[in-house]
């Protein structure tokens, strides 16, 4: 199962890497793919929206809900 979420505050590849790493290590997601230009992250696996939100916010970015 995959879901895509909007994330604000990502301005560079380092930000994208931080978001991906946070989701992949702090949730049950198997993979997180960031589209920096669109400001989204696609999450594969069984991670809930609440888990993804918590990981993104813990990494210092703004979770804006489903894309």
Image (tube, rainbow, N blue to C red):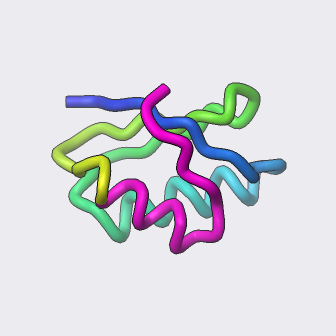
Q: Nearer the viewer, residue 20 or 6?
A: 6
At a point 55% along the width and 43% down the height, the residue shown is 64
Q: Which span of residues is magenta-colored?
A: 51-67
Q: Position of residue 34 (x, y in %)?
A: 57, 39
At a point 43% along the width and 45% down the height, the residue shown is 32
Using the rendered view, name the quadrant where residue 15 is placed: bottom right
Above or below residue 24? Residue 38 is above
Q: Position of residue 9 (x, y in %)?
A: 75, 52
Instruction: Please state if 57 lies on the left or on the right of 24 as rendered.
Output: right
Above or below residue 54? Residue 37 is above
Q: Nearer the viewer, residue 26 or 49?
A: 49
Above or below residue 52? Residue 35 is above
The residue most toward the right is 11
Above or below residue 54? Residue 45 is above
Question: Magenta stretch containing residue 59, yes or no?
Answer: yes
Question: Magenta stretch containing residue 63, yes or no?
Answer: yes
Q: Position of residue 61 (x, y in %)?
A: 64, 60
Q: Nearer the viewer, residue 51 or 34?
A: 51
């Amino acid at each position: 199962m995959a879901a895509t979420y909007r994330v604000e505050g990502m301005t560079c590849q380092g930000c994208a890497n931080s978001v991906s790493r946070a989701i992949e290590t702090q949730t049950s997601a198997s993979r997180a793919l960031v589209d920096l230009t669109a400001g989204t992250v696609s999450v594969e696996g069984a991670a809930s929206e609440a888990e993804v939100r918590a990981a993104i916010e813990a990494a210092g970015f703004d979770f804006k809900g489903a894309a």
